[in-house]
Amino acid sequence: MTKTKKRKMSKSTFAIIIMAVVMVAMLAFGGSYAYFTATATARTGTATTGYVKLNSDETFQFTKTNVMPGDQLIAAGAAKLTVDTTDAAGNYVAIKFIITAQDSEGSPIADVTTLGLNADSILAGTGEGWYASGTENIYIYGSGADTCVAKKNGDITINASAFTLSKDIEDNWTQGSTSSDEKLMGATITITMQAKSIQASNLSATDAVDQLVALFA
């Protein structure tokens, strides 16, 4: 082997070694380069949700026996709802009445209005008060049939007038009969009042009517 070949081989070997060192360095450092960098302080925001609450008193939770025509079932202004909310705009509120009756033999009385039991007769309907929503037996707290009024924390009176069994009910019991002629003596009347509320913020007074009615579905 000549000196020239030895010199060439030495140069080749040297080049291979250099390349090997570079490759090892690339593997060791991932082939990355260093730059100037900066880091901002991390910031975290926390949001806590508020609430809307609605409480009913026990006025509609009553048991009465031997009720006679003309007797009062609920005194005027006795039934109330209480709004409790963190919404600065208040709550929109609606109520629903379910009134049913069975005669003395347990058969449904189809038209309870003949007994004088009609929510329209006890709810305030002028100015700010309760208005029929257009959906049967559902009333909204508002200034009109299609305009809710937001109520902030506090009480809302449900019945402006007394809830009274009509004094015009007529029935007769004939001696020897097992029941009265119209079977209204010994009849059972059930009155259920449901209430719903929804936030007033970010909800228009007119849209609130549809939203409240849907809550009873």
Image (tube, rainbow, N blue to C red):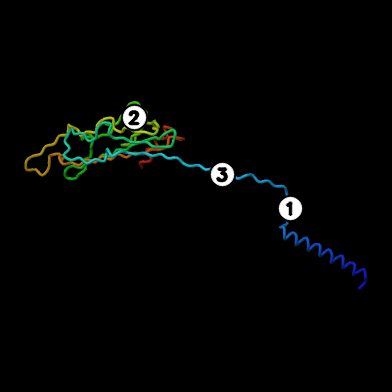
Name which residue type carries label 2: Gly
In the image: residue 176, left or right of residue 122: left
Q: Position of residue 65 (x, y in %)?
A: 18, 40
Among the 4 quarters of the image, the one containing residue 55 = top left
Q: Position of residue 110 (x, y in %)?
A: 23, 40
- The single residue placed furthest to the left in the displayed view is 175
Q: Earlier in the sequence, mark 3 or mark 2?
A: 3
Residue 129 disc label: 2
Name which residue type carries label 1: Tyr
- Pointer 1 residue: 33
In the image: residue 66, left or right of residue 198: left
Label 1 residue SS: loop
| Separation of marks 2 and 1 at Cα, in angstroms | 74 Å
Q: Earlier in the sequence, mark 2 or mark 1?
A: 1
- Pointer 3 residue: 44
Q: Which residue shows up at 12% across the image and 40% down it? A: 180
Within-10-Å neighbours for mark 1: few <14, some 14–19, many 20+: few
Nearer the observer, 155 or 104: 155
Q: Which residue shows up at 81% across the image and 65% down it? A: 17
Looking at the image, residue 11 lies above or below residue 137 = below
Specify the quadrant that holds the N terminus. bottom right
Looking at the image, residue 13 lies above or below residue 162 = below
